[in-house]
Amino acid sequence: MDINVSPSTNSSEGNSQNLIWLKEMPYVKLYQELVDTGTELLLNRLKTYRREVYKLVEKVKDRLKIYKAVYDKNGPASSKIVGVDAGRNGTEYKFAYIPLYGAIAVLVENWEIVDEPLCVTGPPDIWASELDPDRRESLLHMALEYHVAARAVEKWKPNYLLLDGGIVLNPKLHPSFQASPQYDGDFYFTVITVLELLNTCRMLQVPVLGFVKRTHMNFYSSSMKNGQIRDSTLMNFILKDGEYSEPFKIENVMTESYRAVAESLRYDGELPVIYSSYIKTGSVPFRVEVPMFCLNKLEELMSIVYTMASFDGIPYPIHEADRLSRITRPTSNIHSLVLYSKALELVERGEMELKDLDLLLLEYGESWTLNDNLEDFRGGDV
């Protein structure tokens, strides 16, 4: 494949845009291997994968109970519902990583936000030696989400609570043998926080559901000795609009940690037991998590999720919490600019040296986006 880089008859602005596009392309032979040859090979692999999926779909259908969620705008969906989400988008500087995260809770009643959202931000910190700061920030922003959720439940006494993300932390966030002592401490703090949230919901009799947008779980395929196929792929061929699967108990390294910490805090054994299910509210199914003590409210929770789903399948309370808590790259960049300008004031007052400003240089590869089209950029998700 040849790439024509000869002068164009278009305007200078168009030429400039074309040249930028060409500069961002890899070497032409590498491009051919990746885009031309690579996609042909991938399609062959995809055909094989498709056959495996259809075989497994038939097996799962035979053993899976499927239920239909009730669509009722005047039912549970019209009651007091709290939606909670957290956003994050820290920055890697030359001298350290500076985390940036916060959480929002909104109260929705009759399909409208009826009170000032609750807002909590993560404490300003400097991580100069954290091995995996992105992972630690992901962990702490979930802790903040659980914390603000508990505050919202205590303040508003809602009928239901919807979390953006899982009640059970992603197993990838479990401490490894290389984790720093700070990470270990943050991990147990996060587990304690989610257990406190569950206990608060149980005492105040508020059913809680975690809505997981992105999931790689393979519970069904693993149980049939074929762990290469994701549950969401199988459910996409099995579930119809508004249908949800029978819940199954989540068992992994995270739930083991939940049980151990719950025991040390003298909670009863049922509190940390979490079940999961899949529900199709849009073009693809989503995974939800519900504590064992809320299983008797599962029909109501599924009715809320299905009834309040927007065109993309996300329930309205979660959609609004996500919108308000999103920390975009431009917002993160503005945070860096304000930090730099305030440091410059310290230089002018003689409290810092001019050379010290080098500490605030961004690490190589950090993106820099200050753009009028701010809505086109999204922050990091879990």
Image: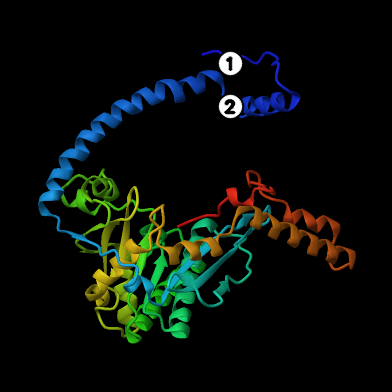
Residue drawn 35% across the image and 82% down it? 199
In the displayed structure, would residue 157 be above or below residue 357? below
**Closer-to-camera residue (152/147):** 152
Q: Where residue 119 sits: x, y (%)?
A: 56, 73
Left/right placement of residue 11 relative to residue 78 reads right
Q: Quadrant of the C terminus?
A: bottom left
**What residue would you read off at disc 1?**
3
Q: Is residue 194 left or right of residue 97?
A: left
Q: In the picture provided, is 218 more to the left or to the right than 60?
A: right
Color style of the picture: rainbow
Classify mark 1: helix, strand or loop.
loop
Q: For the residue marked with disc 2, what is the amino acid? A: Met
Q: Residue 34 versus residue 114: which sits nearer the camera?
A: 114
Q: CA distance from mark 1 to mark 2?
A: 11 Å
Circle 2 residues within 10 Å: few <14, some 14–19, many ≥20: few
Decide if residue 180 is in sight here. no
Label 1: few (<14), some or many (≥20) within 10 Å? Answer: few
Residue 347 vs residue 167, the one in the foreground: 167
Residue 160 in sight here: yes
Residue 298's place in the image compared with 62, above or below, is below
Q: Nearer the viewer, residue 111 or 183?
A: 111
User: Relative to 145, is 343 on the left or the right?
Assistant: right
Q: Position of residue 72 (x, y in %)?
A: 30, 67
Q: Residue 38: horizontal and vertical position, in percent?
A: 40, 25
Q: Amino acid at mark 1?
A: Ile
Tell me where residue 25 sits by quadrant: top right
Image quarter for residue 97? bottom right
Q: Residue at x 36, y 70 (%)?
A: 77
**Discs 1, 2 touching: Cβ within 8 Å:** yes
SS at badge 2 = loop
Q: Which residue was labeled with disc 2?
A: 25
